[in-house]
Each structure stands twice: as C-alpha cells, then as structure tokens.
Image: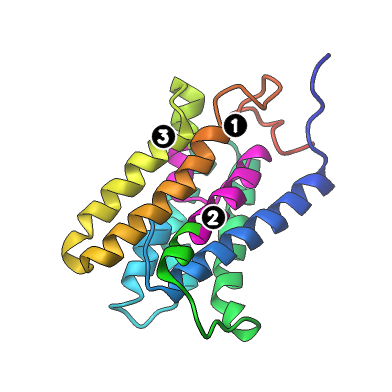
Amino acid sequence: MKHRGHSRKENLIAILTGTFIVAQGVFFLQQAQLLTGGTTGLALLLTHFVDFSFGQLYFVMNIPFYIMAWFRMNRSFALTSICCGGLVSLITDNLHRVVEISHFDPVYCAVIGGLLMGLGMLILFRHNTSLGGFNVLVLFLQEKFGISAGKLQMGIDISILVGSFFLMTPTILMLSLLGAVMLNLVLAMNHKPGRYNDGRTLSDPAVGDS
C-alpha cells in the first residue's frame, strides 16, 4: 500500500514545532558562548564581531541556499525552508524576552543544544523542508547520490568548527564540537535515504503540496 503524504495541517504543525525546538537549541549554545556547524555556527561566530543579531545574520547568510533550493529542488521546498529559517531567526532573537538562565553548565548546554537542534531539524526533514543553509545542500546530495545527510552534515560542521580554531579557546572549541556531534548523531541515526519516504523525492513538485 502506498504511504499517504502529510497533510498541510500536519506540515504546518511540524514546521512550527521543528523551528521552535531548533531555536531552543541555539539559545542554549548562545548561553555558553558556543558555536556549531553550518550557517548557524557562522552566524553565532559573527555576532561576536559585528553589531547584528544572530537572527539577522542567520537569515541573510541562508539566502543563497534558498535560491539554490528554488532552482534545484522545488518551489514548495524552497518556500517552506524560507519560512523555517525566518521563524528560527525570529524566535531565537526574542527568546530572551521570556527565558532567562542565571546558571548553566557549558557541557550541558553543548549536549542539550546539539540534541535539540538535531531533533528539530529531523522533524523538518521528515516533512520535506529544511532550515536552508547546508541543510539544502546535504538533502540535495542525499537525494541525487544516496549520501547520508547526517554524515555529510557532520563532516561540514566539524570542518567549520576546526576552521574556527584561531578564533576560539580550546575549551570552547571542544564543547562546540561536542554539540555538533550530538546534533549530527541524531540526524545520522534517524534520517537515512529511503527509510521514511513513499518513493517521492524533494525534486517532485508534489512533495510538501499535499
């Protein structure tokens, strides 16, 4: 029997849930001044050097990947990815209005931050959307060549963190790497080619339109 796709209502709930969970993860990383991989890590890093918020930097840095999604995947995927990236930017920049942490352990922030981001991204992936950034690239390569999105994302993230070696203390670097590994373990173990789809791909215009 052919697997029935998600309804619009289910996709909407998944987008709101996934982006909210990702934003919580970013918030924990921010509390401990930690980084992560991808455009999220680059945006967190740049907040230390320029007078722009994480959300502003994150959304702008993702624009080239949204364009890639529009032309190389499908418009539904691109539009939902733009919405997801915008929501994460908006929620993260405003969490300080409702949450204040007076004490935190950096190791805990690295672990919970990575796990929450991975869980949120997994929810979005299962509903044929993403946060933009390197998510778009790895999902495209997974679809076309069968490369595990989680493993490829982990390689990119670790490369970015290692490249930040001269801008971070060894402790911050190691904890950031821990968070990136936790994030990508969630994806590598739970998001594998062909396991949860019904035969459609991201390049199929029907994906996400049901």
Q: Position of residue 141 (x, y in %)?
A: 44, 30
Residue at 51%, 26% (x, y): give it: 143
Task: Identify the residue under disc 3.
Answer: 151
- Going by the numbered disc 1, the residue's amino acid type is Leu
Q: Of helix, strand and loop, which one carries label 2?
A: helix
Q: Look at discs 1 and 2 and give the one toward the viewer.
A: 2
Dominant SS of magenta comes to: helix
Residue at 45%, 72% (x, y): give it: 105
Q: Nearer the viewer, residue 124 or 71?
A: 124
In the picture provided, is 48 more to the left or to the right than 56?
A: left
Residue at 41%, 73% (x, y): give it: 32
Q: Residues within 10 Å of mark 3 (few under 14, many from 20)?
A: some
Q: Look at discs 1 and 3 and give the one toward the viewer.
A: 3
Check residue 64 for magenta coloring.
no
Mark before the other along the chain sequence, 2 or 3: 2
Asked if the residues shown at circle 2 and circle 3 are in contact, with their CB atoms under 8 angstroms apart, the answer is: no
Q: Split into 4 quadrants, where in the image is the C terminus?
A: top right
Q: Of helix, strand and loop, which one carries label 1?
A: loop
Q: Which residues are magenta?
A: 112-138
Task: Identify the residue under disc 1.
Answer: 202
Q: Alpha carbon of mark 1 to alpha carbon of mark 3: how far?
A: 19 Å
Check residue 120 for magenta coloring.
yes
Q: Residues within 10 Å of mark 1 (few under 14, many from 20)?
A: many
Q: Of helix, strand and loop, which one carries label 3?
A: helix
- Going by the numbered disc 2, the residue's amino acid type is Met
Task: Identify the residue under disc 2.
Answer: 117
Q: In which quarter of the view is residue 23 placed?
A: bottom right
Considering every residue shown, the one lying at the far top of the view is: 1
Q: Split into 4 quadrants, where in the image is the N terminus?
A: top right
Q: Residues within 10 Å of mark 2 (few under 14, many from 20)?
A: many
Residue at 41%, 69% (x, y): give it: 106
Q: Position of residue 66 (x, y in %)?
A: 50, 50
